Image (spheres, rainbow, N blue to C red):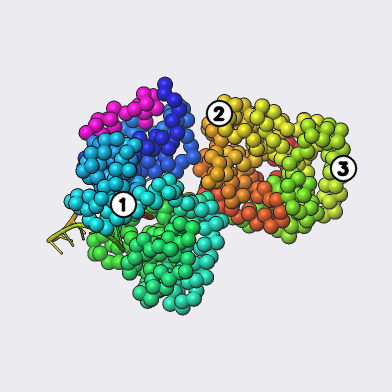
Amino acid sequence: MTERMTNQEIVKVLKEAEAAMEVKGANRFRIRAYQNAINAIETSTFSVYDLWKSGRVSEIPGVGASLTQHINDLLKEGSVKEFENLRKDLPDGMFELIGIQGIGAKRAHKLASAFELDDREAALEKVAEAAEKGKIQDIPGFGEKTQAQILEAITELKKTKNEKPRLLWAQAETIAERVYKYAKELPEIQKIEALGSYRRKKETVGDLDFAVATEDPEKVMQHLLDFPEIVEVLVEGDKKASVVIGNEFQLDFRVVSPDQYGSMVQYFTGSKYHNIVLRSFALDKGYSLSEYGIKESKSKKLHEFAEEADFYKFLDLDIVPPEIRQGKNEVDLAANGNLPKLIQLSDIKGDLHMHTNFSDGTNTLEEMVQACRDKGYDYMGIADHAPSVESRGYAAVQKIITSTRENFNEIDSKYNDIKVLYGYEVNLLADASISLPDEFLEQLDFVIVGLHTAFSQDRKQLMKRYMTAIEHPLVDIIAHPTARLINERDAVDVNWMDLFDAVKKHDKILEINSYPDRLDLPFDLVFEARERGIKLIINTDAHSTGHLDLMRFGVSVARRGWCEAADVLNTQSKDAFLKNLQKFA
DNA sequence: GCCGTTTTCGGCCCGACTGTTTTCAGTCG
């Protein structure tokens, strides 16, 4: 058996096979099938390798018998014969060029053939050199402008290493707000909304897509292009424009008449895969969908929609919440009136992970309790980082716990509208032990454990650590389970299916952490955990009273994981909720 | 190559923009 391959590595192999097929003029639907599978793998936080090991590769949407076989060969033998044959007579260097802005498989092939780019390593450099010498414009199909663009794209690529910034959802929100504010200056802009992955509440947003309703597109487009933060205009037409703002972040605008705004909102919200499913569904009914409306296939009559809801209604569909427009089975469910009733922020009745100034929080216990009462919560739990026996000594820690216990009892009895629980967030140490002895854990109302160190251990040791927590009779909640920090630290390397099996068996609770750069569990793991009936809780991990507002981000993640209120413990009333904790069970 | 409440065969979303062309291919979303 070959070494474990990452999804990224598998995707690379599939992408190059797909590019080879494009160059060779393979059936375009076959190419599309590859693209679908590649996207499914790229957007999954599941390890394809893990799925393969448990014989579940074909469960990946878009992966059928043939691709299952290829992936099997790849993971078993390290290569796929069919792919090798496909690319045998193609210059290797072309694969290095794909992905440069404006270069797809065909242009990459033309370039690589023209300049005999057999060496991958040197390919990029050679093309840049050719562009500088003005040799690219001589290739048929290329011209002066394309040549200049390629040179610029390569220069840019070297600078940024192809890492286009994906902003945290919360960061994208601040940009959207600034655009809204600017748009308000022009009365001709009747409506404007940020759509795409932003409206679907994806945890990171690669660009912001705005639909704009107006009767005066020319004036509006000019106004939008005058947005002061713009540093570069990429595309500029009368219906559409793409621009780049100061932090290299891209904005797309689509301008449309108010009559057609609803269709544009639907189209631009996506996801691409939801729209493909929706359009297939409509085709069966004799309709063709586009951003301009719903066209009757026979008569070509176009129905227009000012409101998105009417667009779905016309197709006899319940309106699908943006968060689950994922191209799964949401369209079928919408047709049958079976869409999940997704959890809402107003369903939340408590929060069990917050810090005070006892550890690294900024507010006092009393202040946190007041803030939770202001939110109307029925229960709350403080989970400060546990005091260390190593540094303080055993007796001192016992003293702290005794006096803290008294404080909690006092404040809990002071208010009869909220239950205040005393817990700690304890560390799951590198040696697979827990950072606080059992006799201390026993004195708490609840126990959260989390990984805070040694994230890059091998999966065997990581799993050993997690099993310590999962099998521990005093542990209630596993905090931020993947320990990822978005854009900073990858999720730890664990076989999530094995871990979920164990969590389910031992009836532990998994946290959905609402911190904008954690959002952990990630939504697709939430989806899987929920399907397995694993208990979930949405916590803020608040380090100040203001952080309690982060709850909405965690709720978004739960919604993207198709959670209803019943799937999340802290939507339950106080009495029902407490039964989920070891101490009150 | 994938997929299935009319189907295991026969379909497969739809359009904008650019650059290079004299009507369209390539790329992108």
Q: Residues within 10 Å of mark 2 (few under 14, many from 20)?
A: some
Q: Position of residue B28 (x, y in %)?
A: 35, 53
Q: Please name the amino acid that badge 3 sits on.
A: Ser
> Are circles 3 and 2 on residues that touch, CB within 8 Å?
no
- Figure check: A443 above or below A558: above
Q: Please name the amino acid that badge 2 sits on.
A: Arg
Q: Gap in Å between the C-alphas at discs 3 and 2?
A: 39 Å
Q: Residue at x 43, y 60 (%)?
A: A244
Chain containing the residue with disc 1: A
Q: Reading the chain from its start, which is encountered first: label 3 or label 2?
A: 3
What's the magenta region? A71-89
Query: What element does badge 3 sit on?
Result: helix
Query: What element does badge 2 sit on?
Result: helix
Q: As rendered, which of A272 and A16 lies closer to the eye?
A: A16
Q: Which residue is mark 3?
A: A403
Q: Reading the chain from its start, which is encountered first: label 3 or label 1?
A: 1
Q: As rendered, which of A329 and A237 lies closer to the eye?
A: A237
Residue A150's label in the rendered image is 1
Residue A486's label in the rendered image is none
Quadrant (top left, top right, bottom left, bottom right) of the C terminus of chain A: top right
